Image (spheres, grey):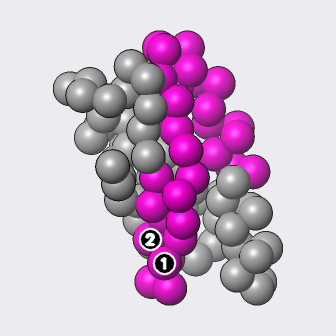
Amino acid sequence: MNKEDFKNKIIDTLEKIRPFIRRDGGDIEYVDVNDDGIVLLRMKGACVGCSFIDTTISEGVEIILQEEVEGVKGVKLVD
């Protein structure tokens, strides 16, 4: 899979996740993916400063992306 297809698969998967995050007043934004397979994301809305954000990312978003998109190694939040 080329880099553009990889990026698009990540974005498509995030679009499936977004409604669940939006339910709680937050949102998630794709920023980039590096050559090591780490997806860079920005949290928005109620997710900013939320005490559950680490759990949401590590036990939710990261696991889903790794299962759905071959080559995703992890997720990192950026400001």
Q: Residue at x 57, y 52 (%)?
A: 30
For discs 2 and 1, the disc positioned in front in the rendered view: 1
Question: What amino acid does circle 2 point to?
Answer: Ile
Residue 38: assigned label: 2
- x and y, in percent, of residue 79 in the image: 33, 49
Q: Quadrant of the N terminus?
A: bottom right
Q: Secondary structure at mark 2?
A: strand
**Residues at marks 2 and 1, CA–CA distance in whole angstroms:** 6 Å
Q: Is the Cβ of the residue at disc 2 closer than 8 Å to that at disc 1?
A: yes
Left or right placement of residue 16 versus residue 56 in this view: right
Question: What amino acid does circle 1 point to?
Answer: Asn
Q: Residue at x 52, y 38 (%)?
A: 28
Within 10 Å of disc 1 (Cα), the crowding (few <14, some 14-19, many 20+) is few
Within 10 Å of disc 2 (Cα), the crowding (few <14, some 14-19, many 20+) is some
Q: Specify the farthest residue to the top.
A: 24
In the foreground, 46 or 53: 46
Is there any visible trace of residue 52 in the rendered image?
no
Q: Secondary structure at mark 1?
A: loop
Total tally of numbered discs in the picture: 2
In the foreground, 77 or 66: 77
Q: Which residues are magenta?
A: 12-41
Is there any visible trace of residue 22 in the rendered image?
yes
- x and y, in percent, of residue 55 in the image: 29, 37
Image quadrant where residue 51 sits: top left
Give the residue number, with chain letter if any, for mark 1: 34
- x and y, in percent, of residue 38 in the image: 44, 71
Left or right placement of residue 52 versus residue 76 in this view: left
